[in-house]
Image (cartoon, rainbow, N blue to C red):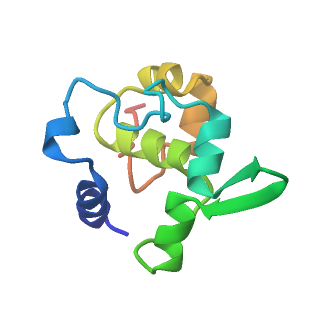
Amino acid sequence: MSPLQLQQTLLELRPEPKLYSPNRLVFTSKTGVPLNSDIVQNFWNEITTHYKGRIHRYPGVVKELAAQGKLRYLKPYATRHTFATWAISSGVSPDKVALLIGDEVETVLRHYCHPNVVEFECPDF
């Protein structure tokens, strides 16, 4: 899925304009708090609830969109890679990316600075 297709898909899923504010979090829990990894896993793959002795399963948003053929399924961890790679390609410094993703600069350089993303200039000797 291209960045433009992803943007269009997200715009289609966006809440009504009256509920939208550029100053609010894009994704929150039902109570409006920031998401943690457990909540993301549930929304991504599947939500399982137990009610009156029965198990109810609801497909996650990404799993459902993948089943509909609207996007290719990737694990939630892939968002980290996508964010870091796009940030680097947009000119964000590796040390800033490392800070944002909670990792070391060396890891960012090793895993997210792809040759086709970051141009390397050979030093003069």
Residue 91 locus on image (x, y percent): 29, 34
Which is nearer the eye, 82 or 94? 82
- Where on the picture, by quarter, is residue 108? top right
Name the residue: 32% across, 61% down: 6
Query: How many numbered discs sit on the rendered protein?
Result: 0
* Furthest-left residue in this view: 17
Residue drawn at (47%, 24%) of the image: 33
* Picture quadrant where residue 102 is located: top right
| Position of 18 relative to 99 (above/below) | below
- 74 or 9: nearer the eye? 9
Q: Is residue 72 visible?
A: no
Rendering quarter of residue 23: top left
Relative side of 63 to 12, left or right: right
Residue farthest toward the right in the current orientation of the protein: 53
Whole-percent x and y of residue 122?
Answer: 40, 40
Task: Give the residue furthest to the front.
Answer: 52
Indicate the position of residue 121 as horizontal and vertical percent values: 36, 40
36 lies left or right of 56: left
Does residue 72 appear left or right of residue 37 in this picture? left
Judging depth in this view, the residue of 93 and 122 nearest the camera is: 93
Instruction: Please identify the quadrant where the N terminus is shown.
Output: bottom left
Q: Position of residue 113 (x, y in %)?
A: 48, 43
Front in this rendered view, residue 38 or 19: 19
Residue depicted at 64% across the width and 47% down the height: 41
Task: Look at 81% across and 58% down and name the residue there.
Answer: 54
Image: 94 above or below 53: above
Placement of the C terminus among the 4 image quadrants: top left
Is 61 left or right of 17, judged from the image as shown?
right
Image height of 63 relative to 116, above or below: below
Report if residue 111 is visible in the image: yes
